Image: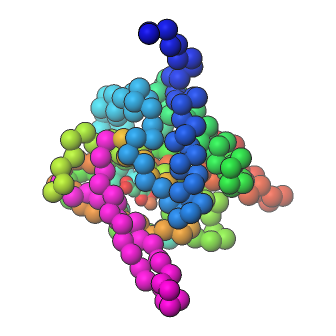
Amino acid sequence: MGALVQVGDDCGTGDSRHVFEAIAADLLEKGYSIKPNAVPTNLLDGLWQQLRSTPSHQFDPAGVGRQRAHMVNNFIRSDTISWIERETVVGENWLNWAAELQQYLNRRLFLGLFSFESHFSHYAPGDFYKKHLDAFKGQSNRVLSVVLYLNPDWMPDDGGELALYHSDHSHHGERSQNVLKVTPNMGTFVAFLSEEFPHEVLPAKRDRYAIAGWFRVNTTSAERADPPN
Ligand SMILES: O=C(O)CCC(=O)C(=O)O
Ligand SMILES: [Fe+2]
C-alpha cells in the first residue's frame, strides 16, 4: 500500500463532503447539528496553536471591540473575543473551510448564505453568556450560527456546556421546551439556525475556548450595502 496520495486536503477540501452532507441533513431535519469531528485534524490543530499563541491582551471584551458583533437584543455575557482574519495561514484555512461549508449548504438547502465572520472566544472560570438569540426575525441578517470548541481533555464536571433550547411539537399539538447540553470538547462543531434556537453558555470551572461564527444573507438595498466581508 502507501500509494494513496491525498491532494489538496490542507483545509479539508475533498474529504469534508460527507461531513457537510451530514450537517445539511441535520439542519433540514432539526434546524441544528452537533458533530464531534467535523473539522479536519490539521485545521483543528492549527486553530488550537493559533489560539494558544494569541496573547490575552489581543482579546477584547465581547460586544465592545470592533462593533462587528451586531448583537440585536439586551444580553449578558462576560467572555472576551478575538476576531479571526485571513492574515494568518490558519485563519485563511479556517475561513476557506467555512466558505466551502457555505457553498455546500447553499447548493443543498438554498440558504443564500453570503458572508461569514467568526472570532475566538475565551470564557475564564465563572464566565457565562446568558440565554439569548443570535438574531431576531427581520432585524438581522445572521441566519446560521456555528461554534467550534477548542478544549482538550474537558471533564464532565468542568461545566461550561452550551445549553441549546428547542421546542418540540407533541402528538397532541402542545409545544414543550427542551434543552440540549453540549459539552465543549475539542473538535465538537455545532451549527444552528440563528433565529430559531435560544442558547446559553453555562459557567465553567476552567478556561473555556471556542470559535463562534455566523453566516449572513445579503440584505443589500439602495440604502444599505453589506460588504462581502
Ligand atoms: O461558546 C458557545 O458555546 C456559544 C457562544 C455564543 O452563543 C455566542 O457567541 O453567541
Ligand atoms: Fe450565541
- Return the x and y of residue 128 as percentages of the image width and height: 29, 61
- Return the x and y of residue 22 as percentages of the image width and height: 53, 48
Residue at the (80%, 58%) spot, across then down? 221
Residue 153 sits in quarter: top left
Residue at the (52%, 13%) spot, across then down? 5
Taking 206 as reference, is 84 above or below it? above
Residue at the (28%, 63%) spot, across then down? 202
- Return the x and y of residue 177 as percentages of the image width and height: 41, 79
Q: Which of the two residues, 168 or 192, is positioned nearer the viewer here?
A: 168
Q: Is residue 160 magenta?
A: yes
Single out the residue that lies furthest toward the right.
222
- Dividing the image into 4 quarters, which one contains the N terminus? top left
Taking 170 as reference, is 220 above or below it? above
Residue at the (44%, 9%) spot, across then down? 2
Q: Which of the two residues, 107 or 219, is positioned nearer the viewer here?
A: 107
Taking 88 as reference, is 71 above or below it? below
Magenta-colored span: 158-186
Taking 15 as reference, is 111 above or below it? below
Q: Is residue 131 magenta?
A: no
